[in-house]
Each structure stands twice: as C-alpha cells, then as structure tokens.
Amino acid sequence: MSDTSEPNNEGDATGQMTFVEHLVELRDRLLRALVVVVVVLLCLFPFANDLYAILAEPLLAHMPEGASMIATEVAAPFLTPFKLSLVLSIFVAMPVILYQLWAYVAPGLYRNEKKLIFPLMVSSTLLFYAGMAFAYFIVFPLMFAFFQAVAPEGVAIATDISRYLDFVLKIFFAFGLAFEVPIATILLVWTGFTTPQAMVAKRPYVIVGAFVLGMLLTPPDLISQTLLALPMWVLFELGVIFSRMYVRNSDEVTT
C-alpha cells in the first residue's frame, strides 16, 4: 500500500497484542458503550410517555375526530414506551458506540485507511439521522393521511400502540439505510469492486431501482414514492462525486 505506515499496535515486545489482550480491550469498549446506553436510557425513561406522544403525533394528527390509539396487551402501556426509550437510547448513543468501535480497530489500520474510515463513520451516522428525520417530518404525514383517506367507510380506526411503534421503527430503519447510499458508493470504489465511471454508466438502473424501492417502502401513491426515490438518486450522485475525489486523492498519493 502507498504512503502508509504500518499499524501501530501496543502489546508485547514485538508490538503485537495477544489474542487475550484483544478480547479484553473489546470487552472494555463494549462495556463503555453499554454504560453510555444505560445512562441515556435512565435520562430518557422518565419522559417515555412524552416521547411516545411525539412519535405518535403524525398519526394522531390525521385520525378522525374522537378516535384514539389503543393498547391490546396488558403490559403494553408500560413496555411500549420503555421499548421506545431503549431504541432512542441506542440511537442517541450511536456516536459513542461508533467511536468505541473506531478506537478498537484504528491501531490495526494504515494511515490512509484511518483518513477514510473515520469520516465515513461520522457521515454515515449523520446520514442515518437525516433519513429518520426525513421519514418523520415528510413521509409520515403523507403516509398516514393516505391511509386514513383510503380506509373503508364505517371502519373505526384504532391503532395499537405496540404495532404502531414496530411499524415506525421499520420505516425509520428503512429510510436510515436508504440515506446511506453515498457511503455505499464510496465503499464500493474503495474496495475496488467498481469505479465511478462504471456507476455513472449504470445511472439509469439506479434511478429505476430507487423508484422501485420507493414503491416497496411507501404507500402506493406517487408523492410518497417520489419523496424517497429522489433523495436516493441525489445521494447516489453525491456518492459518485465523493468517490471520484477519493480516486483522485489515491492517484496523487501513489505518484
């Protein structure tokens, strides 16, 4: 590899950590990440019901007057807000979790790998958050308005709180992953699987795939499908631009 110093490992006299030392360090970093998740959970749990009310707002805003959500299980009024607090704790603590992962693998990376991977970890976290925000503020209002509009006449709408939570978490995860398109394109180029020129040549297939994915992840209306497909297309183009910058920088290093 070019312009890279050997990985800096701390351990025995040869500079290499033993297998047991690696396991101990991994355990310590996992415990640190777990402690942060628990601390965030303890801070969020007192507001669990308020957090769930915020999460349910896009649905409640489009429910018929007098309708409300229901709990069909005995423990659901407690377990559902707790589950939401736990998931939010993991999301909030994600930067710390990723940092612990980075700190664990960084000593074994070359210099140019460190320069690439750490920014990718930070940007992937921000893009995942952006995908969730996009789903909450843009997609949910349109989606729930559509569901309410197509409900058969005479059907009482009363959504179960636990099923609603499971549904929105799946949508959050789907949109969070969809917003990782730039990271995926850069990684494909970095690993040598493809080139920016090859991805540009496949742009028509990417556009069609984005709309197909939008159709699968959103209600069957053109607005919702477009709201997912267009950002994915734009993010793909950004990924191509950044991958070209990476290739250019790599060529300059090798020369």
Image (cartoon, rainbow, N blue to C red):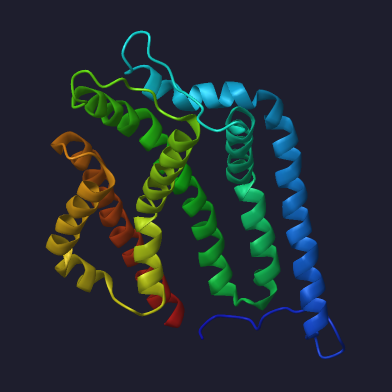
Above or below 160: residue 175: below
**In the orientation shown, which residue stands out farthest toward the right?**
13
Above or below 148: residue 132: below
Q: Nearer the viewer, residue 136 or 104?
A: 136
**Side (left or right) of 204 relative to 177:** left
Q: Nearer the viewer, residue 81 or 243?
A: 81
Residue 10 visible from this viewpoint: no
- For residue 8, which quarter of the picture? bottom right
- For residue 168, which quarter of the picture? top left
The residue at 50%/23% (across/down) is 54
**In the orientation shown, which residue stands out farthest toward the bottom?**
14
**Side (left or right) of 177 relative to 5:** left
State how many labels appear. 0
The residue at 54%/72% (across/down) is 113
Residue 75 visible from this viewpoint: yes
The C terminus, quarter of image:
bottom left
Q: Which x, y percent locates residue 98? A: 62, 56
The residue at 70%/68% (across/down) is 104
Q: Which x, y percent locates residue 79? A: 62, 35
Above or below 31: residue 170: above
Q: Which x, y percent locates residue 109? A: 62, 76
